[in-house]
Image (cartoon, rainbow, N blue to C red):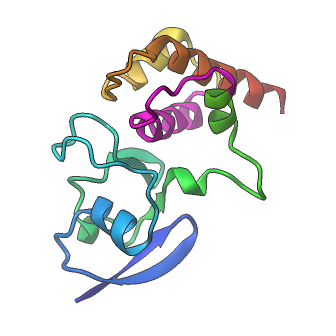
């Protein structure tokens, strides 16, 4: 069986069973390795992508569920060779230590900023509560999201 998926603005056909997790297709078939396999139970957030603008755990999302959706991965955030404001803010704030959680943090933050362009610190902490970071860079991550919100407000 084959399924069509629209990922980062491009529709591609993938030979896979409908119950195949989206994460496997993104990494193995499309070679988009930003989303990480963390827990496999939708509890850590390392595999987060946007599905029609909603932060979604790709490790437990079957491709049949997203066949008609717009899927955005962290690789799809940059445009015309320029990093997205969130990506740049994470670099500027040195928010990544090991980097494993960063994909999920950025994608969850992207959903937040798309809903609320000028969030409070409490808004950011709430939006990222489901994303785990074992390195302890939470404060830098929060600062990075707030910095990106400020940068978006200036453009």
For the image shown, how many numbered marks are present on the structure? Answer: 0
Compare residues 112 and 48 and report the one nearer the observer. Answer: 48
* Residue occupying the far right of the picture: 155
Q: Is residue 85 above or below residue 35?
A: above
* Residue occupying the far bottom of the picture: 1
Q: Left or right: 95 with respect to 89?
A: left
Quarter of the figure that contains the C terminus: top right
* Residue occupying the far front of the picture: 98
Name which residue lies at 39% across and 37% down.
100
Task: Give the image location of residue 69, x and y in percent.
Answer: 41, 65
Prevailing secondary structure class for the magenta stretch in the rendered image: helix
Name which residue lies at 53% across and 50% down.
74
As for residue 77 lying within the magenta part, the answer is no
Q: Is residue 73 above or below residue 146?
A: below
As for residue 98 lying within the magenta part, the answer is yes
Task: Give the image location of residue 30, x and y in percent.
Answer: 43, 72
Task: Give the image location of residue 113, x and y in percent.
Answer: 58, 32
Q: Is residue 54 above or below residue 90?
A: below
Name which residue lies at 20% across and 69% down.
20
Q: Which residues are magenta?
A: 92-116
Q: Is residue 96 above or below residue 51?
A: above
Q: Left or right: 143 with respect to 132?
A: right
Q: Left or right: 110 with respect to 117?
A: left
Q: Left or right: 56 with respect to 82?
A: left
Quarter of the figure that contains the N terminus: bottom left
Name which residue lies at 69% across and 25% down.
92
Compare residues 93 and 6 and report the one nearer the observer. Answer: 93
Task: Give the image location of residue 53, x and y in percent.
Answer: 48, 49
């Amino acid at each position: 069986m084959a399924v069509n998926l629209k990922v980062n603005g491009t529709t591609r056909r993938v030979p896979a069973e409908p119950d195949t997790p989206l994460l496997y297709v993104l990494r193995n078939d499309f070679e988009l390795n930003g989303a990480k396999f963390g827990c496999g139970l939708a509890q850590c957030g390392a595999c987060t992508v946007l599905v029609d603008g909603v932060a979604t755990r790709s490790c437990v999302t079957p491709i049949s569920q997203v066949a008609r959706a717009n899927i955005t991965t962290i690789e799809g955030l940059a445009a015309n060779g320029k990093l997205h404001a969130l990506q740049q803010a994470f670099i500027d704030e040195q928010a990544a230590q090991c980097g494993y959680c960063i994909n999920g943090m950025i994608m969850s933050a992207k959903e937040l900023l798309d809903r609320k362009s000028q969030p409070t610190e409490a808004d950011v902490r709430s939006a990222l509560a489901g994303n785990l970071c074992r390195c302890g860079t939470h404060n830098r991550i929060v600062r990075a999201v707030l910095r990106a919100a400020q940068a978006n407000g200036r453009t």
